[in-house]
Amino acid sequence: MTPLQALQQHQQLCDELHELALEENRFLQQHQRAPDAALLDRKRQLLSRLDDALAALRAAPRDGENQSAMRQALDKARARILQILQLDKENEQLLLRYSLGGGRPAGGTIVPPSMLQKIYQRHN
């Protein structure tokens, strides 16, 4: 496999990972809970394929073939990876928010004014 082919395979896999991250993001925003096992299994399978693609990239010979096409493909892959990382960070924040929330409303607890008055009186 040539380095350009390995990079193109990696780019295709990055596109699939991006689509999966978008799907996970939509799921988290709509359902406000952790994704189903099917989505997590798909993510694991894609990550396994990503390991294989990275191994192919490392094993590809580094000859001087069409440097401009390689540079363009590399820049495109890097841009997609940054998008995936940003989406993944947002997904982690949503997952954390919904898992810690436990289905409670986003607002705080309501404390009666008399309780607040007692607290202030103790600390004066």
Image (spheres, rainbow, N blue to C red):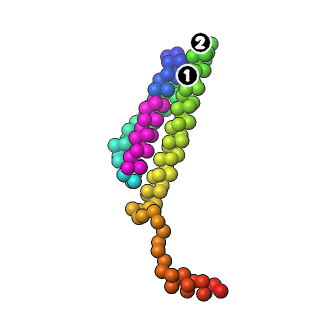
Task: Please name the residue shown 39% across and 53% down the image.
Answer: 33
Q: Secondary structure at mark 2?
A: loop
**C-alpha span from label 1 to label 2:** 13 Å
The percent position of residue 82, horizontal first and vertical second, equals: 56, 36
Disc 1: CA contacts within 10 A as few (<14), some (14-19) or many (>=20): some
Instruction: Please name the residue that numbered disc 2 is placed on.
Output: 65
Q: Is residue 87 above or below residue 108?
A: above
Labels 1, 2: front one: 1
Q: Is residue 2 above or below residue 17?
A: above
Please say whether residue 40 is visible from this viewpoint.
Answer: no
Q: Quadrant of the image for the C terminus?
A: bottom right
Tell which residue pokes out farthest to the front in this image: 113
The dominant secondary structure in magenta is helix
State the extent of the magenta-drawn residues as a range: 13-30
Instruction: Please name the residue that numbered disc 1 is placed on.
Output: 73
Q: Nearer the viewer, residue 27 or 114?
A: 114
Task: Please name the residue shown 43% across and 57% down the image.
Answer: 99
Q: Amino acid under label 2?
A: Glu
The percent position of residue 72, horizontal first and vertical second, equals: 58, 21
Task: Please name the residue shown 41% across and 64% down the image.
Answer: 104
Q: Is residue 23 above or below residue 68?
A: below
